[in-house]
Image (cartoon, grey):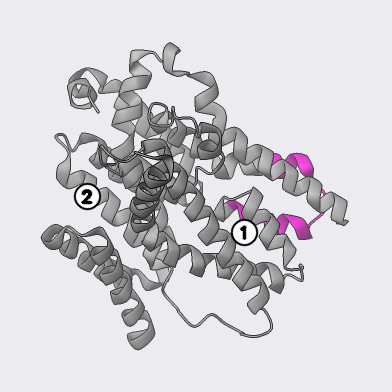
Amino acid sequence: MPVSAQSQKAFKAAFRSTLPIMAGFLFLGSGYGLYMRSLGLEPWWPMLTSLLIYAGSMEFVTARLLLGAFDPIGAFLMTLAVNSRHVFYGLALLDSYQVPQKQYLIFGLCDETFSINSSAKVDEDINRGLFYTWVTALNQLYWLAGSTIGAFLWGLVSRVELKGLDFVCTALFAVIFLDSFLKEKSHASSTLGIVLSGACLFILGDGFILPALFLIVLALMLLHKPLGRFYEHD
Amino acid sequence: MSTIERLATIALVILGTQLTRHLSFWIFSKNNEPSWVKYLGKALCPAIFGFLLVYSLKGYGSTAWQAAAALGVTALLHIFKRQMLLSIAGGTLCYMLLVNLIG
C-alpha cells in the first residue's frame, strides 16, 4: 500500500475514534481559554500552554500558578503530583508504543489519548503507529483549537451556554470501561480498578489518585499467579 | 510575576509532565522488560479504565442523580447497541437535558 493511502486509512479510523473527544475538548478547552482570560492573561498564554503542556487538569493549575509568587520548584513538584498517573499509562503502553513515532506519542500521552490508544482494536491492514499518531495529534489539535476559541471568545460571551457538555468525557471513559468489561475473560482487573479507586476517593477525597493507583498495582502483583494466564497474549 | 518568570514556570510544568510520561519508557525498554512488567502492562489496562471512570465522576457531586441517570443510559445503550459513538452521544445528551431542563 502506498504511504499516503496507508496514512489516509489510519487517519479515517483515528478520526472516528476521536469524535467524542472532539466534542469534549472543544468544550473543555474553550472553558480553559475563557478561564485564563478571566484571570487577566493574554490569549497567547492558553494557546502556548495547551500546545506545550498539553495536560488538561495541570493547565488549570498552571493558570493559578502564573498569578502567584514565582516558585519554580513548587510548580515542578506540583506537576509531578498532579500528573503521576501518567507513569502507569506508560507501563501499560510499553509494548504498543514501540513504533517509529514513539517520542511524539509519549509527549502527547494524556488521559483521553491513553484510553483510546490502549483500548482500540486496530484493524490488521491499518498501520498501528500511524493510527496512534493521528489519535494523539487530533486530540491535541482539538484541545488547542478549543482553548484558542475560548481565548478569543472572552468579552463576546459571558458564559458558555452548552452546560453539561463536559459529561462527554465521562461518558467516553464509561463506554471504554464497559466495552473492555464485556469482552474480557477475567473481570478481576476491572473490578479492582473500580472498587479500589472508589474506596480511596471515598476515604481520601481529592488526594486519592496515587494511593488508588499504587493499591491497584499492588493487588495485581499479588494476584500475578492466579491471573497471569489471562494476560499472556495480545 | 514577570513574563520571563511565567515562561520559566511553564517550562518546569512541561518538564514535570514529560518526566511522568517518559519515566516508564526510560526504565523498561522492550528488551529488558521483566515478565512481571509484561504481565502488569496488560493486566493494568482494565483497572486504569475503572480508575479513569471514578476519576471523571469525581466532579459531579452537585448533580449526582443526573450523572447517575446519564451513566445508566450510556451503559444500557452500549449493552444493547454496542456502538461507542451512539452510547456516548446518548448519555451526554441525557445529562445535558437533565441539568438544563430540570436543574
| Placement of A97 over or under B52, stated as above or below | above
| Placement of B27 over or under B76, stated as above or below | above
| Placement of B18 over or under B32, stated as above or below | below
Residue A72 picture quarter: top right
| Same chain, labels 1 and 2 | yes
In the rendered image, residue A183 lying in the magenta stretch gets the answer no
Is residue A181 rendered to the left or right of residue B12? Answer: left
Asked whether residue A196 is in view, the answer is no
Q: Helix or strand or loop: what does disc 2 sit on?
A: helix
Q: Earlier in the sequence, mark 1 or mark 2?
A: 1
The type of residue carrying mark 1 is: Phe
* Chain to which the residue tagged by mark 1 belongs: A
| Magenta stretch, residue numbers | A58-76
Which dot, 1 or 2, sits closer to the camera?
2
Is residue A35 rendered to the left or right of residue A225? Answer: right
The type of residue carrying mark 2 is: Asp
Q: Residue at x 49, y 30 (%)?
A: A100
Q: Position of residue A59 (x, y in %)?
A: 62, 55
For mark 2, what is the residue? Answer: A179
Q: Position of residue A11 (x, y in %)?
A: 40, 51
**C-alpha span from label 1 to label 2:** 30 Å
Q: Nearer the viewer, residue A94 or A122?
A: A122
Residue A60 badge: 1
Decide: marks 1, 2 in contact (CB < 8 A)?
Answer: no
* Label 2 crowd bin: few (<14), some (14–19), many (20+), radius 10 Å: some
* Label 1 crowd bin: few (<14), some (14–19), many (20+), radius 10 Å: some
| Placement of A160 over or under B73, stated as above or below | below
Quick one: quadrant of the C terminus of chain B? bottom left
Can you name the residue that lies furthest to the left here? B80
